Image: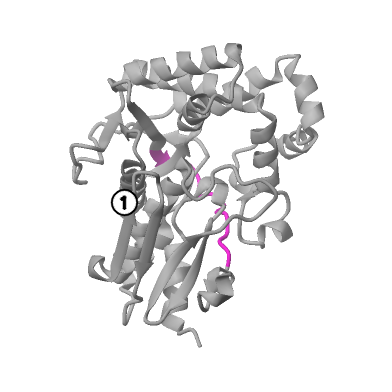
Amino acid sequence: MISEIAKRTIDLAVTTPSADNSQPWRFVNVGDRWEVVYHHAGSKDLFGPTGHATLLSTGALSYNLEQICGSNNTSASIDTAGNWRLSFAPPDRINEATESALRQRHTNRHPFIGSINNSPIEPIGADNQIRLQFISEPTSIRKLAEAIKICSELRFKNEELHKWLFSSLRWSPSEAETGDGLDLRTLHLPPGGKAFMKFISSWPRMSALNLLGISKAMALIDSLPVRNAPALIVISSKQEPALTWQAGHKLAEIWTNLNQAGLAVHPYYVITDIANRLQRGEFDETAAGFAKKALALSRNVLNLEADELPHIVLRIGYPTTRPERSKRKSADSFIIESQLDSL
């Protein structure tokens, strides 16, 4: 019999961010403790248990668990190949202030207002291996927006990524009740935007429209909020699995604190995604040239070394509206009561 406090712990822990709200975990009961294991749902697994997006989101999950259970009751390890282990013991009780802070963390894709003159990340402890950069200078913001635009166009030309995006969308309130994926209402779409998204959801149609330049238009739309952002926060480090995990841990801390301070947050992962695909040799010569241009531009703006990579870019500002929030799956759907049940 699973205790209510264990269910509440899991329910609160999975409020952490994950790629397109995929929530790629299961929780296995092992006596008094719980083990987190990777779980993929759907027809195509883009990231795998040791992929960058998985390590980033699971590092963020470890932050939530530490806040809920305490660092002494949470254990995490990761090797040089990216194989990780995360376990925890549920607390006797959950602190109300902690629960409120973690549940308030959310994505806001709407326009932001105002200016941010002082860095909101200064109170957050950094280390020598993870770079936290606050960017409010307009020229630097425009250059990063250009890098995002280039990478976004490459994404819109990629069949695999196109299918991933549209498979993750939840088109109606009833579909959104599944508790995973992206509720279309969370996107900042203009009038007619839903119908247009439905129109381009077919890859053969999107591929044909790309010949007319639709990918360029979509990339421009995708990058405009960054170009107009009051400020950005970028988390970077060398390309090592343990550092990706730490970056995810730092991401959850920063994001939670920003929302607590009344600032809205909109994450952009596209530069990192394109960099990883370039490294795996997934692009032809032309696409690889554009990817290298975008990475060179972003590294120049961020003053990164050749072996360093931005893990994520956060557009931040004061919100103009309270957004719809994608739901999470129920705690019961994550739970595996024993190791035998997971076989």
Q: How many marks?
A: 1
In the rendered image, the vertical position of residue 329 relative to residue 144, given as above or below? below
- Residue located at (27% from left, 20% from top): 303
- Residue located at (50% from left, 35% from top): 111
Q: Residue 326 versus residue 239: which sits nearer the camera?
A: 239
Mark 1 belongs to which amino acid? Glu
Which x, y percent locates residue 227?
A: 45, 23
| Extreme residue in the bottom direction | 1
Location of residue 296 by image quarter: top left
In the rendered image, the vertical position of residue 61 relative to residue 192, given as above or below? below
Q: What SS does tag 1 mark?
A: helix
Q: Which residue is mark 1?
A: 253
Which x, y percent locates residue 320?
A: 47, 41
Query: What is the quadrant of the C terminus in the image?
Result: bottom right
Relative horizontal placement of residue 203, taking residue 157 as reference (left or right): right
In the rendered image, the vertical position of residue 87 relative to residue 39, given as above or below? below
- Badge 1: residue crowd in 10 Å (few <14, some 14–19, many ≥20): many
Which x, y percent locates residue 88?
A: 35, 70
User: Can residue 331 be seen in this snapshot?
Assistant: no
Location of residue 298 by image quarter: top left
Stretch of the chain drawn in magenta: 317-329
